[in-house]
Image (cartoon, rainbow, N blue to C red):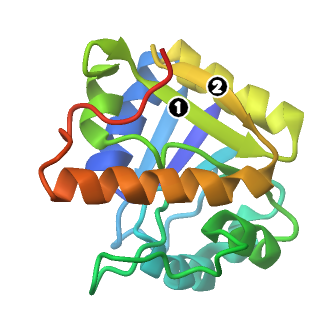
Amino acid sequence: MAHVSIIGSGNMGQAIAAVVAKGGNTVELFNSTDKDKPVTGDVVILATPYPAYDQVLADRADQLAGKVVVDISNPLNFETFDSLVVPADGSAAAELATRLPYSTVLKAFNTNFAATVATGKAGEAPTTVLIAGDDADAKAQLAGIVSAGGLKAVDAGALKRARELEAAGFLQLTLAVGEKASWTGGFNLV
C-alpha cells in the first residue's frame, strides 16, 4: 500500500484522491492553507496549476527530497490560452526535475480531465493515464496506484516524453474550451 500526498484540492486533486483511496492506498490532500502541515507521502502529486509551482517549491522543496513527485500540469499561457510557456524543446516536468534533483519526477494525469478521472471513463472507454519518467520503479509504483483505483495506466516512456504529453494536454484543453471536445471525453488509448 502506498501513502500519497496531493498538493492541490481542486477538481483534479479531489478526483485523483478518490482514485488513490478507491485502490486501498492512503491519501492526504493539501490546500493552500496547509503550508505548515508536512508532506508525508511517498508519492507526492502536484495538482496545482503550473504558475503555482514556484510557491509550492518555495514552501516544500525540502519535503519533496527522496519522494516520487508527479507533475500533472499543462504549462499553458493562461492569459492568451494559445501557447505553452516552456521552451519548445522542454517541459514543465523537465524543469521540475532540475529544480528537485533529490526527487524522482514523473509526468502523469495532464492528458486527463477531472471528470474522466472521477468516473473512470473517457467517453465510453476506460480512462487511460499516461505516465512518463526515467525511473522504472517509480513508474510501476504510480501505475499500481492508478490501476488499483480502477483506471488504466500506460508507460509513455522517458521523462523527455513529457514534452509530447504537455502538447497533447494543451491541444485537448483548447478543444474543450472551444467546445469541440467534451470535458467528459478527451484523448484516450483503446
Please state the horizontal and vertical placement of residue 69, each as a whole percent of the image: 68, 54
Q: At numbered mark 1, what does the secondary structure look like: helix, strand or loop?
A: strand
Question: How many numbered dots are placed on residues in this image?
Answer: 2
Mark 1 lies on residue: 129
Mark 2: few, some, or many residues within 10 Å (few <14, many ≥20)?
some
Q: Are marks 2 and 1 in contact (CB under 8 Å)?
A: yes
Q: In the picture shown, does residue 108 fall above or below 153? A: below
Q: Residue at x 72, y 73 (%)?
A: 89
Tell me the amino acid under the disc marked 2.
Val
| Residue 68 place in picture, x, y as percent | 74, 49
Question: Which sits in the foreground, 188 or 53?
Answer: 188
- In percent of width and height, residue 9 lies at 32, 55
What residue is rendered at 44% in x and 52% in y? 169
Horizontal side of residue 141 vs 181, given as left or right: right
Query: Quick one: SS at disc 2?
Result: strand
Q: Badge 1: few (under 14), some or many (20 or more) residues near its Cα, within 10 Å?
A: many
> Residue 4's quadrant in the figure?
top right
Q: Which residue position holds label 2?
A: 154
Using residue 178 as the reference point, say whether residue 61 is left or right of it: right
Residue 160 locus on image (x, y percent): 78, 57
